Amino acid sequence: MKTKDNAQFGNPLLEEFQKHHDKCGRWEYLQSEESSKQYAWSVPTPEALSQVAAGERLIEIGCGTGYWGRLWRDRGIDCLLYDINPPQEGSTNKSHPNTECWTEVLPGDETKLAEHADRTLVLMWPFDGVATRSLDFYQGNRLIYVGQPNGGHHGRTGGEEFESRLKSGGWILVKTLELPHWVGRTDRMYVYERKNS
């Protein structure tokens, strides 16, 4: 799979956001859709990235282009990145059409979690029940969820069933961090730990 791994890097999505955030609402919306497809659905910040401790090992399911994973890898974090349909030229990935991954993304879904209870689970804007199904397979004790409260815009992230399962499954919210967000979004990072871990 061809990736952008060798590209000179900083945090181009945060730079895009800072450049275009205060423009006219409709124009900002169009820019947000384009940036989301090319990079990621949520805008990472240094504070958000630092929620992962040195030596912590991650597994991200539904990672899209692997943008956040690339930033963590650049910080020396060990990340396994999976997407059911990793973006690449000619792929049928509707969330990230006509783009390449920012780093190595392996084909796979939430069933991969059964093999990696030793890693922190990362879910970024999980669609189509991925968040809830991930809880069925994940046996680890730390979860980083990035999305919108209560499923957010058109129920596109997490959702009520996911939040209900977190509460009933013994997960404790230990940190909430508001992220920069485009018009019409309310992105946040939520860090959970399982009780008795």
Image (cartoon, rainbow, N blue to C red):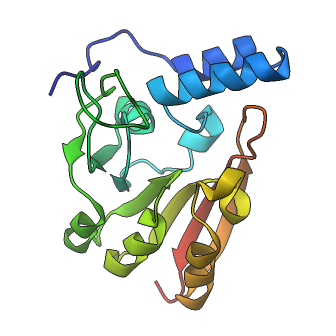
Occupied quadrant, residue 17: top right
Question: Can I make out residue 43 in this image?
Answer: yes
Residue 164, compared with residue 70, is above or below; it is: below
Residue 3, position as x, y percentages in the image? 24, 22
Occupied quadrant, residue 165: bottom right
Which residue appears at 75% of the width and 16% of the height?
Answer: 27
Q: In this view, does 115 lie to the left or right of 164?
A: left
Count the marks. 0
Which residue appears at 78% of the width and 39% of the height?
Answer: 184
Comparing 194 with 97, the one in front is 97
Residue 116, position as x, y percentages in the image? 24, 67
Q: Quadrant of the N terminus?
A: top left
Comparing 141 with 156, the one in front is 156
Q: Is residue 183 left or right of residue 16?
A: right
Residue 146, position as x, y percentages in the image? 58, 52
Which residue appears at 47% of the width and 56% of the height?
Answer: 123
Question: Can I make out residue 39 in this image?
Answer: no
Residue 185, compared with residue 13, is above or below; it is: below
Residue 36, compared with residue 122, is above or below; it is: above
Occupied quadrant, residue 46: top right
Which residue appears at 72% of the width and 35% of the height?
Answer: 180
Residue 3, compared with residue 178, is above or below; it is: above
Q: Is residue 22 left or right of residue 88?
A: right
**Residue furthest out toward the left:** 1
